[in-house]
Amino acid sequence: MKRETKAIGLDIGTSRIVSAKRANEQDQINAQLNAFVTLPHSKLTESVFKNENVPYFVDGSEFVIYGNEAARFANLFNRETRRPMTRGVLNSNEPNSSALIRRIITRILGESAQEGVRLCFSIPGAPQDSPDDLTYHEKTLAQILSGLGYQVTSINEGLAVVLAELEKTNYTGVGISFGGGMCNVCMAYLSIPIFSFSVSKAGDFIDSSAASVAGESVNRVRTLKEQSFHFNGFFGDQVKQALAVYYDEVIRLVVSGLKDALTETRHAAPADRPMPLVISGGSSLPQGLVECFQKCLADNNLGVHFSEIRTATDPLNATAKGALVAALAEM
């Protein structure tokens, strides 16, 4: 008999929405792209979409296809996917952004919650390099989830990485999420955040900047990055060289932000033990990223010794798993 706990962790990221549940002591993961694409509407195509269970709705004269299917249709018809979120928050240039996110969440979790289910969802840290206000983003997501019947709390994305990965150090250390819209950083001591922040340049910035330099589509650059890019110095291939350059910029911004945060909270940082540092997120997957990050840390002399610097056990799903840990703790 399958035994599910009444708790859900939900990573609401710029590029993916990921849920984590626990059944029979095992984490169950479900994910959808946080993206959509539009195509011309026809009644014939609509009947085929229904037969094929393609997730869509009709907006005027267009189909809006969302979730994982958005990428497939974008590739087939040489279109760029669009995002309900940008730089870690709801996209103000997409009027249907909150409605689209609700549709993607219900595709993952179902139309309504069972009674008494507690859900913890991720939110970004305050951006160091932009004036964006996160209040509207957090409150709107909370309203969407509460409207579906969940008992809702939120968690900082970097702290979620700590909760997912650092149980052995009693949730003491640094969690970093290299996502699509933002990079989120949190230092915690015994699960209590000492500081957290975000940098609003991340995977999407790398993809779009490299695409612009190389004269390629963002979709093609993103696919190449995910399938074959790795760090090993200079590249003859222009796309890979551009990816390396913009990855380096993002890493340097994160390390610079970490150095500033450590300087400001030096009196509060735990000095009684070396801390681990864990890197997660979809943009952390290329081989060699951890080594590049370590070199950048050494070059900047942060004045803190880390007991280890490693990639998360499950980089794509660490935030959702950490949010699940937080939800379970509240039961």
Image (tube, rainbow, N blue to C red):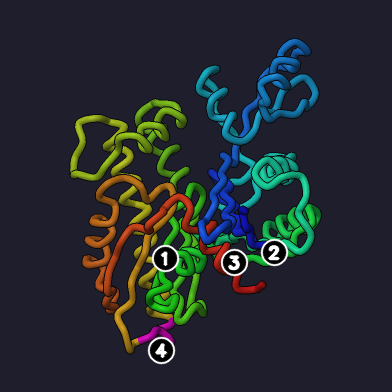
Q: Nearer the viewer, mark 2 or mark 4?
A: 2
* Residue 81: quarter of image: top right
Q: Badge 2 is on which residue?
A: 118
Q: Is mark 3 on a helix, strand or loop?
A: strand
Q: Give the range drawn in magenta.
A: 265-270
Q: Which of marks 3 and 4 is in front?
A: 3
Q: Is residue 133 visible?
A: no
Distance between the alpha carbons at the discs numbered 2 and 1: 21 Å
Distance between the alpha carbons at the discs numbered 2 and 4: 36 Å
Label 3 Cα neighbours within 10 Å, binned few <14 / some 14-19 / many ≥20: many
Question: Earlier along the polypeptide chain: callout 1 or callout 4?
Answer: 1
Q: Where is residue 147 in the image (x, y as percent from the top left)?
A: 81, 54
Determine which of the numbered discs, if any, sits on residue 155 in the image: 3
Distance between the alpha carbons at the discs numbered 1 and 4: 25 Å
* Residue 34: quarter of image: top right
Question: Earlier along the polypeptide chain: callout 2 or callout 4?
Answer: 2
Label 4 Cα neighbours within 10 Å, binned few <14 / some 14-19 / many ≥20: few
Contact check, label 2 and label 3, Cβ < 8 Å: no
Camera-side residue of 35 and 152: 152
Q: Badge 1 is on which residue?
A: 165
Distance between the alpha carbons at the discs numbered 2 and 3: 13 Å
Q: In this view, does 100 lie above or below 281?
A: above
Amino acid bearing label 3: Ile
Q: For the point 68% across and 30% down, which residue is it?
A: 55
Q: Badge 4 is on which residue?
A: 267
Q: What element carries label 1?
A: helix
Left or right of residue 130, residue 242 in this image: left
The outermost residue toward the front is 1
Amino acid bearing label 1: Glu
Q: In this view, does 211 lie above or below 32?
A: above
